[in-house]
Amino acid sequence: MAGLGPNLLAFTVAIAVTALELLTTKYPRTAAFVCHTVWFYVYIVIYGAIAAIALALLPVLGAHIQSDGINLMNPWIAAAAVGISVKSLLHIRIFNVSTGPGKDLPVGLETIVLLFDTRTR
């Protein structure tokens, strides 16, 4: 990789994607309130850190990851791709377990995300 720049780009893109998705879907009318809570920033920084770590691990996993549509050999394109995709990867759920009427518990990677997600509500 080309130094710290691509990792910083992956971190920034992941933070932006996570923040925008959270503010526009879960809190469309209360963005001013959410932006003043520390848990909002903890939540988005965790996603950014995961993206930077995933990008750092990409050369190790490069032999196992194949991309036909994008050039992951370019560190800047790989950084943007990792930053954009980290949120969707962490929200993979295998199935839901019903815990009551209208309440479901996701089973999969989203189970871990749910622990942080309830802090921001």
Image (tube, helix red, strand yellow):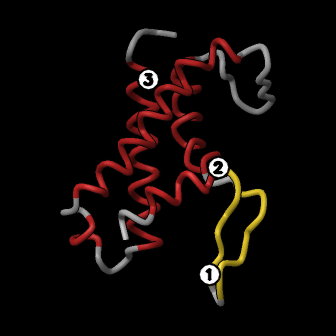
Could you give the CA–CA distance between mark 1 and mark 2, rounded to whole angstroms?
18 Å
Residue matched to label 3: 7
Tell me the tag on residue 103: 1
Residue at 32 percent across and 80 percent down: it is 29
How many residues crowd mark 1 within 10 Å: few (<14), some (14–19), many (20+)? few
Residue at 23 percent across and 55 percent down: it is 38
Depth order, front residue of 104/64: 104
Residue lying furthest top? 2
How many residues crowd mark 2 within 10 Å: few (<14), some (14–19), many (20+)? some
Left/right of residue 39 with respect to residue 12 in the rendered view: left
Residue matched to label 2: 109
Badge 1 vs badge 2, beta-carbon distance below 8 Å? no
Residue lying furthest left? 36
Residue at 37 percent across and 63 percent down: it is 119
Left/right of residue 44 with respect to residue 79 in the rendered view: left
Residue at 51 percent across and 23 percent down: it is 76
**Disc on the earlier residue, 1 or 2:** 1
Query: Of the residues shown, which amino acid type is indicated by label 1?
Result: Lys
Q: Is residue 109 above or below residue 80?
A: below
